[in-house]
């Protein structure tokens, strides 16, 4: 699980620089310029995701301890939660409808739901490590965003139109269907349906 842990550490460090080490981030921007910093951040982010993916596959192939054995009904709950996560994910990329306005940060909500759903359905040590880490990161990031909103550093989305809720639901449902029917098995190697 060394590669998985390395990828998770790199991901967390990269994605919590702004709230926890703003001086380091500002120094990087001053040295590289904003486009250079964003490019470096993007490259390191992609590297961390590649390490996580490769490390997860490696850990799965080499086995891991079962920390708990989820009952079958939790898989059904996880599938339902993933539908909600898919809609939230799409809403995070669209102008603000009711979903985005109410949730404030629907991408983070989608990530938290995704992590929780997978914790319900997977009890292997490497799965628990991945999903607990990502869930903790999303919670920490949401707390720091709340502080940035209070300080006036970040603005909340402003409602534009309810049509974006409809688009979020339709595209989210299509994304969910694609993931359940083929993408999950194709990308992860495990079909979500028995």
Image (cartoon, rainbow, N blue to C red):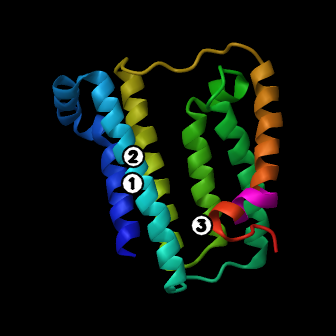
**CA distance separating discs 2 and 3:** 23 Å
Q: Which residues are magenta?
A: 180-185
Q: Nearer the viewer, residue 30 or 112?
A: 30
Work out whether 190 lies above or below 33: below
Q: Is residue 155 visible?
A: yes
Please name the residue that numbered disc 2 is placed on.
Answer: 45
Indicate the quadrant where residue 168 lies: top right
* Numbered disc 3: secondary structure: helix
Mark 2–mark 3 CB contact (< 8 Å): no
Decide: few, some or many residues near mark 2? Use Cα within 10 Å; few <14, some 14-19, many ≥20.
some
Q: Measured from the top left, where is residue 164 in percent x and y?
A: 75, 23
In the picture, measured across the screen, residue 122 lies left or right of residue 137, that is right
In the image, what residue occupies the spot 83% across and 35% down?
Answer: 170
Helix, strand or loop for disc 2: helix
Task: Indicate the position of residue 162 as horizontal and vertical percent values.
Answer: 78, 19
Q: Residue 181: within the magenta?
A: yes
Q: Are marks 1 and 2 in contact (CB under 8 Å)?
A: yes
**Which residue lies under the disc numbered 3?**
119
Q: Secondary structure at mark 1?
A: helix
| Number of numbered discs overlaid on the protein picture | 3
The residue located at (65%, 20%) in the rendering is 95
Question: Magenta region's main secondary structure?
Answer: helix
Neighbour class for label 3 at 10 Å: few (<14), some, many (≥20)?
Answer: many
Q: Nearer the viewer, residue 21 or 6?
A: 6
Q: Is residue 112 found left or right of 144 in the rendered image?
A: right
Q: Which residue is mark 1?
A: 48
Picture layout, residue 24 above or below residue 164:
below
Answer with mark 2 or mark 3, whichever residue precedes in sequence.
Answer: 2
The residue lying toward the viewer, choosing from 40 and 27, is: 40
């Amino acid at each position: 699980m060394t590669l998985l842990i390395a990828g998770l550490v790199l991901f967390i460090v990269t994605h919590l620089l702004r709230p926890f080490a703003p001086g380091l981030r500002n120094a990087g921007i001053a040295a590289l310029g904003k486009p250079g910093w964003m490019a470096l951040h993007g490259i390191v982010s992609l590297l961390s995701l590649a390490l996580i993916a490769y490390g997860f596959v490696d850990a799965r192939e080499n086995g891991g301890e079962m920390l708990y054995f989820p009952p079958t009904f939790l898989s059904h709950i996880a599938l339902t939660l993933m539908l909600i996560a898919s809609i939230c994910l799409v809403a995070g990329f669209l102008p603000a409808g009711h979903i985005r306005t109410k949730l404030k940060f629907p991408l983070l909500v989608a990530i938290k739901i995704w992590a929780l759903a997978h914790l319900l359905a997977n009890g292997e040590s490497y799965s628990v490590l991945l999903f607990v880490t990502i869930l903790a990161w999303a919670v920490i990031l949401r707390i720091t965003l709340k502080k940035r909103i209070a300080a006036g550093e970040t603005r909340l989305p402003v409602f534009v139109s309810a049509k974006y809720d409809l688009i979020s639901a339709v595209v989210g449902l299509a994304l969910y269907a694609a993931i359940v029917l083929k993408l999950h098995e194709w990308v992860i190697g495990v079909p979500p349906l028995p």
